[in-house]
Image (cartoon, helix red, strand yellow):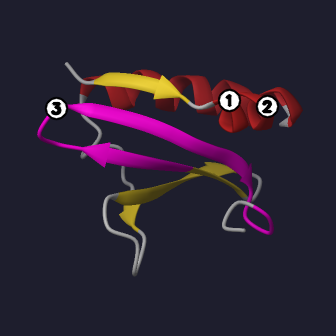
Amino acid sequence: MWSVSVRPQAARDLDRAPERVRDEALDMLEALGDDPNAVGAAPMRGRRGLYRVYLGEGYRMVYHLEPASQQVAVLRIAHRSTVYS
């Protein structure tokens, strides 16, 4: 079981997201705790340890994976036009 933490920025992003995206994000958070490698995420190029996963309606979740300590830190949950900035 992996430990999942949501950073303050990601929590604010989640509050602002449409309801369907929030529901999908909450399901994804649960799945990340079970196995972050099985959620269909893609590693981000040029950013070691960062992954992104599609949530729907153009939204992405960006998270940092620390395999040694089995920790996942969710950094952002936002529309693709702003999530990477």
**Of marks 1 and 2, the one in the foreground:** 1
CB contact under 8 Å: marks 1 and 2: yes
How many angstroms separate mark 1 from mark 2 (CA)? 6 Å
Residue 76 or 17: which is nearer the viewer? 76
**Identity, as a three-letter code, of the amino acid under mark 2:** Arg
**N-terminal of the two: label 1 or label 3?**
1
Q: Which residue is mark 1?
A: 8
| Camera-nearest residue between 82 and 30 | 82
Q: Residue 62 placed where, x, y %? A: 54, 52
Q: Classify mark 3: helix, strand or loop.
A: loop
Residue 47: x %, y % from top left: 40, 71
Numbered tag placed on residue 12 in the rendering: 2
Residue 76 against residue 10 in the figure, above or below: below
Label 1 is placed on what type of residue?
Answer: Pro
The residue tagged 3 is 69
Is residue 7 left or right of 15 when viewed as pictured? left
Q: Position of residue 60 (x, y in %)?
A: 63, 54
Task: Identify the residue at horizontal 41%, vertical 58% (top origin).
Answer: 51
Circle 2 packing at 10 Å, graded few (<14), some (14-19), many (20+), is some
79 shown above or below 28: below
What segment is highlighted magenta in the picture?
62-82
How far apart are labels 2 and 3 at the CA level? 26 Å
Examine the image and state in which quarter residue 22 appears: top right
